[in-house]
Every structure is written in C-alpha cells, then in structure tokens.
Image (cartoon, grey):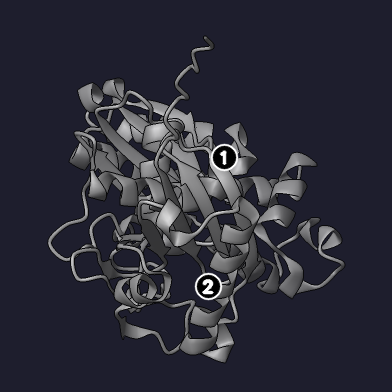
C-alpha cells in the first residue's frame, strides 16, 4: 500500500500595497518575505482620490489574477502610505504627493473593497519592517532604516516592533531641525530640516543656486547646458570627473547627512543603521565623510555600537514591509 507523504503547509500569504505619489506597487508576499506575484502602475495623483483608489483596486485585481488567488486565500492586507497617518485609526491625515487627500480612512476603504482585514503603516516604517525581517536589519535589536532620496524618511524598529509614537507620526526624521536660524525652507513649512539640507533635492537646489550666482563649474555640460536639468546625478557625475564645486557640494551634503546620523545615534542608540535611497547609491564618496562627521558628533560609545549597512531590498521594501506588518498584526 502506498503511503502518501504529507505536504508541507503553505506559508501564510498576505497582500501588500505600497501607495506612492508616483507609483502603486501591490504584491502577494509569503511569511518568508518572498514576493509571489506583483503589479506596478502609475499613481493618477492629479486626478484625485477616487481615481487613485480605483487604480489601487485594479492593481490588486491584476496581482490576484497573476497569483491565481482569491481574497479567501490571503490572511490580511497591509497598506503603506506616504505622509502622516495613524495606524490605530487607519487614517491618512495628508500627503504632499497626493493632492486633496486629507483625513482619509484608507484602511477601512480598502478592507471593505477587498474583503480582508487591513492594516495601515507609514511607507518608511514599512520599508524599515522589511529590512529588519528580511534585509540589512536581520538580527538587530535596535534598528534604524533611512532612505536618502528626493526627500529623507525612515523608521525605527525597537525590540522587534515598529516605534510609531502616540499618533503614528514618529520617525519623521527628515524633519529634524539641523539649521535652526539660517536653514533653507522645507516642503513641510519649516526651515532648516534635514531633508532640506541633505536630500537629493537639496543637493540639486544648492547646485543650481551656486550656478545661478555665477560659480564656475562643468556641471552644466552634464545637463545639456540647462540650469533646470541640474540634478543630484549631474552633481555626482561632475564630481567624479574632478569638478571642484561639485565635489564641494557633495562634501556639504555629507556634512549634513552625518549631523543627522549623529542625532539619531545619540537619541536611539541603534546597533544597526541601514541606508537606502537614490542619493545613497553614490556610495562611499558621499557616505564615508558622513560617517566621519557622525563619529565626531555622536557619543563615542554609542557610535561604537552601531553598524552601518546598505539597505538590501530597496524598491520592494515598502510593499514587502506592508505585507509583513499585516502578518505581524494578525498573529
């Protein structure tokens, strides 16, 4: 008589939704952080809230079809959102990249439409969750994830749990005040924020300002001679070719990055700090001087405890983290 061997149980599957100002990414993710199916589409942000919600639901449908699954096959859905939000109430308060979105109960809207229990998380916190469980933060006790890109965002994982604060607005690290008196304006309405000094946008803005003032540089040759085409990438290319001004601008950005790193090290005392995002891809030319500034400004014992690491999951971290957050919440 043949004895049928028991099949291994299928790992729980959750649906992740990563809502951004320019793209929507949805994915079915298992408990090992492996993406089983995914869909990516543009966010029709300018068309308004209802158009964005329809785009989310169409993306979910395509993902479920690709995976060959129904809602009943999934455990829950996690939704990562850009901007201040409250994970307890499921409300997205606002988002600078989603015009007209104010106090939107997005968790409940998605739960009702899909027919699954839903959980809300800030997109940077979602990326932190993914890196902690499946990426650069594995094994950490106190973990900080930082993304340095168009803006600066991040998340804290302390003793295995996201630290989200009293109303879900903790870890808005891009809006730490770095230059209180003479700092540039930030999109948040404040001045001198970390994001306004050390992001890719800040680097490009400062480069254009210097060029407009008549500074000598080869940067425009990398921008088709047009000032408005000067980007952080242009600054990087010019610095690599030996342009003194571009090199100076990168060092300036490193200085402000390192100052922010030092503040976080002194406040949180992490054992791992993972750095991701488009600007961070410049690598050692940007980050090594930043680490040196952090070493100079942070408490020596706290700095000695931290290990800097490159983020591993990057583009998928938000959607994987949203799914992982939902799985954590239902366990």
Residue 264 against residue 80 in the figure, above or below: above
Crowding at mark 2 (Cα within 10 Å: few <14, some 14-19, many 20+): many
Q: Is residue 111 above or below residue 129?
A: below
Q: Residue 308 occupies which quadrant of the picture?
A: top left
- Which quadrant of the rendered structure holds the C terminus? top left
Is residue 86 placed above or below 266 in the rendered structure?
A: below
Q: x and y percent of residue 145 in the render?
A: 38, 42
In primary-sequence order, the first of circles 1 and 2 is: 2
Tell me where residue 137 appears, x and y as whole percent: 38, 31
Q: Does residue 20 appear in the picture of this structure? A: yes
At 21% across and 49% down in the image, what residue appears? 163
Task: Please tell me how many numbered marks the rendered image carries.
Answer: 2
- Mark 1 secondary-structure assignment: helix
* Residue located 64% across and 68% down the image: 41
Nearer to the camera, 8 or 235: 8
The residue that mark 1 highlights is 286
């Amino acid at each position: 008589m043949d004895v049928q061997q028991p099949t291994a149980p299928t790992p729980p599957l959750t649906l992740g939704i990563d809502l951004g100002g320019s793209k929507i990414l949805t994915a079915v993710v298992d408990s090992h952080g492996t993406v089983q199916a995914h869909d990516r589409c543009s966010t029709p942000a300018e068309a308004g809230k209802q158009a964005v919600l329809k785009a989310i639901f169409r993306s979910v449908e395509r993902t479920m079809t690709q995976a060959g699954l129904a809602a009943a096959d999934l455990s829950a859905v996690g939704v990562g959102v850009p901007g201040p939000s409250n994970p307890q109430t499921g409300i997205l308060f606002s988002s600078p990249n989603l015009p007209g979105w104010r106090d939107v109960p997005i968790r409940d809207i998605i739960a009702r439409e899909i027919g699954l229990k839903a959980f809300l998380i800030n997109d940077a916190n979602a990326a932190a969750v993914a890196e902690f469980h499946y990426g650069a933060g594995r094994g950490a006790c106190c973990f900080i994830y930082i993304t340095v890109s168009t803006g600066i965002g991040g998340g804290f994982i302390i003793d295995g749990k996201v630290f989200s604060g009293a109303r879900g607005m903790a870890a808005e690290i891009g809006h730490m005040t770095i230059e209180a008196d003479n700092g540039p304006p930030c999109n948040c309405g404040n001045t001198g924020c970390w994001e306004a000094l050390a992001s890719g946008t800040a680097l490009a803005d400062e480069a254009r300002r210097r060029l407009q003032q008549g500074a000598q540089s080869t940067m425009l040759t990398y921008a088709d001679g047009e000032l408005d085409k000067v980007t952080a990438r242009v600054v990087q290319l010019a610095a690599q070719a030996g342009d003194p001004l571009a090199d100076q601008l990168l060092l300036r950005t490193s200085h402000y990055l390192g100052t922010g790193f030092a503040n976080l090290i002194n406040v949180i005392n992490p054992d791992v700090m993972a750095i991701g995002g488009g600007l961070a891809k410049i690598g050692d030319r940007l980050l090594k001087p930043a680490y040196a500034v952090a070493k100079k400004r942070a408490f020596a014992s706290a700095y000695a405890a931290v290990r800097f690491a490159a983020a591993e999951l990057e583009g998928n971290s938000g959607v994987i983290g949203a799914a992982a957050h939902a799985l954590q919440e239902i366990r």
